[in-house]
Amino acid sequence: MIKNISLAFVVLIASTQAYAVESLISLESHYSAKETADRFESIIKDKGFTVFARIDHQKNAAGVDLTLTPTEVIIFGNPKIGTQLMLCNQMVAIDLPQKVLISEDADNKVWLSYNNPEYIKQRHNIAGCDKVISKISGVLSKLSMAATAKSPQ
């Protein structure tokens, strides 16, 4: 009996992990942190997104005599898309508007990161909204690649 319960528990844990997705998607940028953030902001504005805030954590750290490598968060959104997701599950509003993190690591590599829409889907147990999730995934991927990829000469 105990062996059966243990086996069932192991199977449950293994199956749960099989469905887990990475919570963040990160792309290495070919630009400095500031230039990556500037590029991303410009691209999203050109696409009609609203920029709600741009937070420079490095600057804020310096204001309290602390040192932080370049770290910025851009909070942005589009009500036409975000509202569709909230209609699927209103609790997803805690993760909206969307955010991107642009940061420089200890090896001086610059990264643009954002919440994986598939993770948000899992987190909020969203069902029946795969088209919306897919659209958001595609848009975030295209915007992020445009901001981080080297421009053709």
Image (cartoon, rainbow, N blue to C red):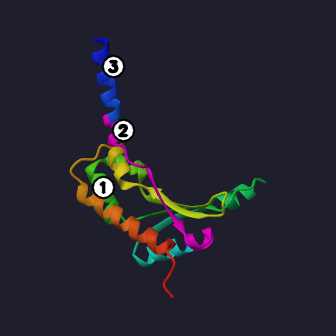
Distance in Å between CA atoms under marks 3 and 1: 39 Å
* The N terminus - image quarter: top left
Residue shown at 21% from the left, 51% from the top: 128
Kind of residue indicated by mark 3 = Ser
Q: Residue furthest top?
A: 1
Counting from the top left corner in percent of width and height, residue 139 is at 36, 67
Counting from the top left corner in percent of width and height, residue 120 is at 37, 49
Counting from the top left corner in percent of width and height, residue 141 is at 40, 66
Tag 1: Cα neighbours inside 10 Å, few (<14), some, or many (≥20)?
many
Residue position for label 2:
17
Residue at disc 1, secondary structure: helix
The one of 32 and 9 positioned closer to us in this rendering = 9
Residue position for label 3:
6
In this picture, residue 8 sits left or right of residue 25 = left
* Residue range highlighted in magenta: 15-37
Residue 93 lies, with reference to residue 42, above or below; the image says above
Residue shown at 74% from the left, 55% from the top: 67
The one of 137 and 50 positioned closer to us in this rendering = 137
Residue position for label 1:
85
Residue at disc 3, secondary structure: helix
Q: First in sequence, mark 2 or 1: give its number.
A: 2
Tag 3: Cα neighbours inside 10 Å, few (<14), some, or many (≥20)?
few
Distance in Å between CA atoms under marks 2 and 3: 17 Å
The one of 12 and 54 positioned closer to us in this rendering = 12
Kind of residue indicated by mark 1 = Leu
Frontmost of labels 2 and 1 is 2
